[in-house]
């Protein structure tokens, strides 16, 4: 391979949580195309096997591990697996997330609140806590936020709180990691055309009494849902040297929905 043919992440090691979902898998594919070695992390073995089947990548470049990202021992286990396999970590894409219920705060199920905060906020905290010592200097941490990390709507107390909190976590870690040239950013998608979003919209349609997908498109200046592949391009930007002077930022990938 000629030097000019090398990918932007040639030889880099990336860990992707929520890797079997549409955004996670699109990002994995994009990172692999740029020469990275990728550890795929998700909760269920079966979904990881299905994701692997779509990759067509050499087993030496894409390895999967099932883990509960909200569990400290599992977090250490998947991070140490990446280090053991490839000698270190260059990129953490902390993408695992759950949506929770759509319900007024006075009726919001406490157990659902706890699970949303655990997956959406505790898990990235654990990944930073145990991942930073393994991350190589000059690396990148990308956290999947949401447009509702800078806005909100009725009925989504847990999800919005978790995504607002994620920005606070990111900004703190960005300042702590800067001395090692490690960049830390939040990527905030708007509605994406995938199963995760459509499930949310199914519940939302019942609440608002109209088809939620079309309703949300009307709130997005670009007039449509995004694609997982479009989000993957933003992940690549934040993971690669192209964003070498970008840290502590919230990159909105929401079609303008927040403005």
Image (spheres, grey):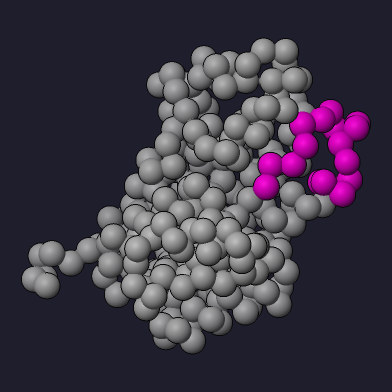
Q: Which residues are magenta?
A: 98-113
Among the 4 quarters of the image, the one containing residue 91: bottom left
Q: Is residue 31 above or below residue 62?
A: above
How far across and down, in percent of the image, does residue 54 sit? 41, 57
Q: Residue at x 34, y 55 (%)?
A: 30
User: Of residues 248 and 98, which is closer to you in this image?
Assistant: 98
Q: Is residue 42 above or below residue 144?
A: below
* Residue 110 counted in the magenta span: yes
How far across and down, in percent of the image, does residue 206 sit? 75, 20
Q: Residue at x 44, y 23 (%)?
A: 224
Q: Is residue 26 visible?
A: yes
How far across and down, in percent of the image, does residue 172 sit? 58, 59
Q: Quadrant of the N terminus?
A: bottom left
Determine whether, in the image, residue 71 is placed left or right of residue 246. Answer: right
Among the 4 quarters of the image, the one containing residue 236: bottom left
* Residue 224 counted in the magenta span: no
Q: Residue at x 88, y 41 (%)?
A: 109
Determine whether, in the image, residue 121 is placed left or right of residue 150. Answer: right
How far across and down, in percent of the image, does residue 98 sit? 67, 47
Q: Give the total of numbered labels.
A: 0
Predominant SS of the magenta segment: loop
Q: Is residue 141 above or below residue 152?
A: below
Q: Is residue 242 above or below residue 223?
A: below
User: Of residues 218 and 18, which is closer to you in this image?
Assistant: 18
Q: Residue at x 51, y 41 (%)?
A: 188
Q: Is residue 90 visible?
A: no
User: Of residues 48 and 186, which is closer to you in this image?
Assistant: 48
């Amino acid at each position: 391979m000629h030097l000019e043919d090398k990918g932007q992440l040639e030889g880099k090691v990336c860990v992707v949580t929520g890797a079997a979902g549409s955004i996670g898998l699109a990002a994995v594919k994009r990172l692999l195309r740029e020469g990275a070695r990728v550890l795929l992390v998700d909760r269920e073995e079966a979904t990881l096997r299905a994701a692997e089947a779509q990759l067509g990548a050499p087993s030496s470049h894409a390895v999967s591990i099932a883990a509960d990202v909200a569990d400290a021992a599992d977090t250490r286990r998947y991070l140490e697996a990446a280090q053991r396999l490839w000698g270190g970590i260059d990129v953490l894409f902390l993408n695992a997330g759950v949506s929770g219920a759509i319900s007024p705060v006075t009726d919001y199920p406490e157990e659902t609140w706890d699970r949303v905060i655990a997956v959406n906020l505790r898990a990235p905290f654990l990944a930073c806590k145990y991942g930073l010592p393994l991350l190589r200097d000059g690396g990148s941490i990308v956290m999947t936020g949401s447009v509702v990390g800078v806005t909100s709507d009725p009925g989504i107390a847990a999800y919005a709180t978790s995504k607002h909190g994620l920005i606070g976590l990111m900004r703190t870690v960005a300042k702590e990691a800067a001395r090692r040239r490690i960049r830390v950013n939040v990527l905030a998608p708007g509605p994406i055309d995938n199963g995760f979003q459509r499930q949310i919209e199914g519940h939302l349609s019942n609440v608002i009494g109209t088809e939620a997908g079309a309703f949300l498109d009307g709130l997005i200046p670009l007039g449509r849902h995004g694609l997982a592949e479009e989000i993957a391009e933003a992940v690549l930007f934040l993971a690669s040297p192209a964003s070498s002077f970008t840290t502590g930022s919230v990159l909105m990938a929401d079609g303008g929905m927040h403005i």
